[in-house]
Image (cartoon, rainbow, N blue to C red):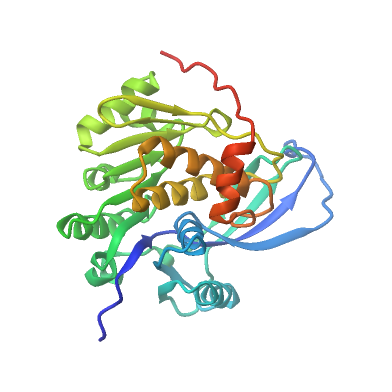
Amino acid sequence: MTEPSLVDLVGVGLNATDTLIALPTYPERGSKVKYSHTNILLGGQTASAVMACQQWGLQTRYVGKLGDDDAASRHARAFADAGVDARIVTVPQASSPQSLIIVDEGGERTVLNLREDRLRLTPADLRPEWITRARALHVDGLETPAAIAAARWARQAGVPVIADIDELYPDVEDLLINVDHLIVSRNFPSVLTGERSLERALRLMRSRYQCTVTAATLGEDGVLAWDGDSFHRRAAYRVRVADTTGAGDIFHAGYIYGLLRGWPLERQLDFACAAAALNCTATGARGGIGTVEAIESLMTSAPRYTPVPLAD
């Protein structure tokens, strides 16, 4: 088998077909609610981050698992059209992952996931050269054994590992010890460490897992990152929000783009915040992925939210 080409980024993890339902408010329990239409779009944490980086000019590879249905064909076409080197493991007679996403009038989303157990990516599905022939690896946490295997191979090859974690998955700490850039959701640090203070939790995470950077994304409050010497608090950009689906995915993509460009951490975080904000101005996990020029323009022109003080 021909050795895969060297790419800037390889992503190992989730993809999904998203059915978006727009409603004025989240429905009350027991209620009946009318909706006018749905949008069926492609998403998934890692797949969306990879697609964004590809659109910004990086060469990328995606590794994931799909069924043999029409949704899988849509994913394959999207990767091929974008130029992504997609290594898809196909499960016969299986339905690809799906998400139902309710988006309220303010753009906030609620996600309902459907995924067959047979579609979980395993270490046996991976090839080391898919991982090591890259300048960076991005993983999420749901398919933890596969992510652990990929992260270990990357570490052994000197490839930096970026992780997007939002839940305390079984054995996730075996993954975290192999992560260099750990960027998690708002509540994860406290759940993981038991520390109420976000600053103390991020310090403890970096010390415990020997990460280069630990950070938490905070929605409208931006991001807080700890690099071992100082905290970096960067405010989110204020935009007209249509849909927050995929904001975190595109934040990670922006962080990775800046990392591979060798930018200072604060510029990485600002670019990531702007990329996420721009994505929120359109519908879908990938609907508002802007050009690098559009993201940098937003960084110079858009106002920012005033972050609320963090709890001690």
Kindly tell me whether residue 166 is visible in this rendering: no
- Is residue 11 rendered to the left or right of residue 156? right
Indicate whether 116 appears above or below 266.
Answer: below
Residue reaching furthest to the left:
156
Q: Position of residue 160 (x, y in %)?
A: 26, 52
Residue at (40, 59) in percent of width and height = 13
Q: Identify which residue is drawn at 60% across, 77% down.
A: 70
Residue nearest the viewer, comparing 148 with 275: 275
Residue 275 locus on image (x, y percent): 55, 47
- Residue nearer the viewer, 183 or 95: 183
Would residue 187 be seen by someone viewing this image from the given angle?
yes
Q: For the view shown, which residue lies furthest in the top direction?
A: 312
Q: Nearer the viewer, residue 233 or 107?
A: 233
Q: Quadrant of residue 297?
A: top right
In percent of the image, x 43 and y 39: which residue is there? Answer: 267
Q: Quadrant of the N terminus?
A: bottom left
Residue 109 drawn at (x, y percent) = 64, 43
Q: In the displayed structure, does residue 66 sit left or right of residue 207?
A: right
Please identify the quadrant where the C terminus is shown: top left
Relative to 207, 226 lies left or right: right
Counting labels gives 0
Q: Could you tell whether 224 is left or right of 147 in the image? A: right
Image location of residue 106, percent across then percent down? 73, 37
Determine the image quadrant of residue 201. Answer: top left
